Image (tube, grey):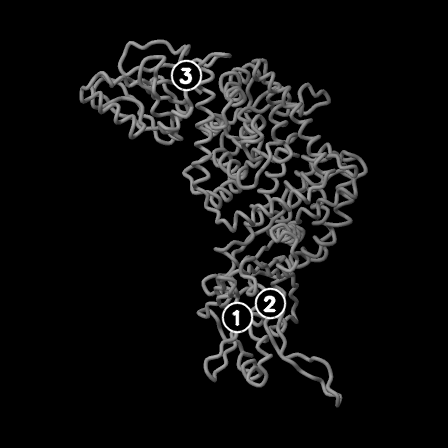
Amino acid sequence: MNYWVISPNVLNDSTESQWKKAIQIKRKAYIGFDSETSTGVHFADSIKLGDLILIAQGANRNKKCFLCGIVDSDSVWVHEMDTPGKAQNRKLINTLSQSELEQLNLDFDGCAYGEADRIPALYKLKPTENSNDLRIVVALQNAIQKKRIELIMENIKLTPERQIELKNLWIKFKEDNNQNGIEAINKEVSNLLEQWLVYKEKIEGGSFSLEEYTNRKNETESVPGYYLCNFLERTTRTVFGSSKPGNANNFEIKLNSDGESYTFRKDLKKGDKQNINSKEKATEAFDSKIKPLITGIVVAKDATEKVSLVENSDYSAKQVLRKLAVLDHLNDFLFIYSDAVIDALHDEFLNSNEKTNLGKNHELRIVANSLLDVENTPIDSVLLSRFLWKYSNTQGIADKNTPNVILYGPPGTGKTYAVKNSLDFICQGDRTRYEFVQFHPSFTYEDFIEGIKPKGVTKDGNIKFELVDGIFKNFCKKAKANPTKDYYFVVDEINRANLSSVFGETLLCIEKDYRNIVELKDDKLIVDTKNLIKTQYSTLIEEMIKENPENKSLAYHYVQDNELHHAYFGVPNNVFFIGMMNDVDKSIDAFDLALRRRFKWIRKDCDYDVIEQETKFRNGDDFSNIEDYLKACNKLNTYISDELGLGKSYEFGHSFFMKMTGIANRKEISAANIASLFDLHLRPTLKEYMRAMFAESELDKKLEEALIKFKQPFKSN
């Protein structure tokens, strides 16, 4: 970042063109060629995007500043001049007003920007140690940062109620991390930051080499994590988050498996896996493109400057560059690099024109720091990132726009586990706000909504029948009584029941636009009756209320109009309906169109990241060849879905593959371990899957082929 002082020098010149120049700068904050004059100064030839500009008037020691800001990368336009060439007019953002600048009481005495022989004049500040330029720059940066924070906080979308709920969630989340867990995180952060300093010193000192950027794992670890790409992608993921690049070619230059040649991503053609380049050629490419980019990001002091360098680069694995930016600015960013997660959080939290991932990340961190009173410590940065990652995942399950969700996919993909964890988190452990039910073929409308059921025996020995609420109706009553909280009704194995029969006429009520609107005003419950309906038992309930007013409790909502009694049912707008199903057990064709269109469908497949992160050796260490194991799991699932033709619904979920922890007795997974896992946990299930597709005589042959595919990435013992 460069720091400039521009002096329009118009106070002693009353010509119309010079005054227009001053007005343009003051009102529009545009810096560059002045189309009103024939002698415009081409400031854009010197000023770069992201530079800090101070606009001042007067002699050196008596300069009065009336505008300051950062050159905006989103507002660049080109003006064709009468004379040859072009000049760019750049807009200032995060501008400080004259009154804000006056409060800084800037003293230009002793500044080293020199004189200019043109009007208007452009000076460059040179902030060296102990210089007045440095003091001015620091004051301006601090003021601009304060202004930036104020502008971001003015654009928060979260309601006051949501802000309180979010803060309570954060407090509970921190409390759930015991002292032992915090100590372990602190120890890991300190260890990784010490390792990062090894790289940082090399990068800043100019000695960072191609071998330290891309390499192969070997017994000799010359730098932490063997090489920078692996250090950023894998070594640091435990506390600084996952930043997978897709594949290693996205690091632009990759050392090939032969340990001698290199692959250049830009030279890969569609379908290619690698190309061959010499070390000399790779070093030249690294020194000319990648090394300067990495150096620029590391030496940049301002968070917004890092954002600009990362997001304006043409480097493919931007997730990894984002982590590079984060390591020196732990308190300015979240350790989240996913576009989907950052976009979702940013859209929920802020009204902002920011378009880049890291820029949105920075704005989110500013908001979180303020709303949640986050402490500027590494432990709070780690916990905050984990908290918002988890919060985003819970929001992704169901939201106000799509309150009805079906999670479907193969068995073992963590559908039930994810929902239970998410609800325990979002409900702050309040078990009364969510209900789990498992459907089965004999589950009925009477179980779900309401019905007449046996209720004991009379004195003369006859069975006594009563009208009782079903589990869903009872849950809706509970949610209606507390409209300021969200409630979640969860159905496992939802496709095992006759759904049209179970829902009956209440199917309409779960639709978003037909929810019952319930509000609390002045401590009084206000129920909008517009979307309420009568059920098949409403008439009976009304008759029972006439006989005994205490039976009003049988109605979800009761209205008396003169002599008329009305018993209604509805689904309150604070109820979220979540269904789960293994579509291998029964096809989603069990859902008729009327049901399908009322639900958002989220597919859950095998998550190989979960296998990588959670499958540990018995003492908690990583398996040394976990990458090979991931390839093996992927090969088996691909064989099942593509080569056997069973489809993705018959693939194994990650929970099956995580059983390796209880099988392997060494830190290196072996082919024998693969065979044991297959025989003990996978073979019986896969055999049942294949019975509908193949003759009995073919099953053993197909199972052996599957095992061969599973063991392929491993050397046989």
Q: Image check: 187 left or right of 375?
A: right
- Taking the image as drawn, is residue 16 in sight? yes
What label does residue 613 carry, if any? none
Q: Tell which circle, 2 or 1, labels the residue nearer the N-terminal end.
A: 2
Labelled pair 3, 1 in contact (Cβ < 8 Å): no
| Residue 677 quadrant | top right
Name the residue tied to disc 3. 107
Q: How many numbered dots are placed on residues in this image?
A: 3
Distance in Å between CA atoms under marks 3 and 2:
71 Å
Give the percent coordinates (x, y) of residue 487. Answer: 58, 59
Q: Image check: 57 left or right of 183?
A: left
Q: Tell which circle, 3 or 2, labels the residue nearer the N-terminal end.
A: 3
Query: Residue farthest to the right?
Result: 665
Give the percent coordinates (x, y) of residue 564. Answer: 48, 83
| Residue 6 quadrant | top left
Name the residue tied to disc 1. 506
Distance in Å between CA atoms under marks 2 and 1:
11 Å
Labelled pair 2, 1 in contact (Cβ < 8 Å): yes
Name the residue tied to disc 2. 472
- Secondary structure of residue under mark 2: helix
Nearer to me, 345 or 217: 345
Residue type pointed to by label 1: Thr
Q: What residue do we see at 61% from left, 63% from top?
A: 494
- Residue 317 lies, with reference to residue 115, above or below; the image says below
Q: In which quadrant will I find the N terminus?
A: top left
Distance in Å between CA atoms under marks 3 and 1:
73 Å
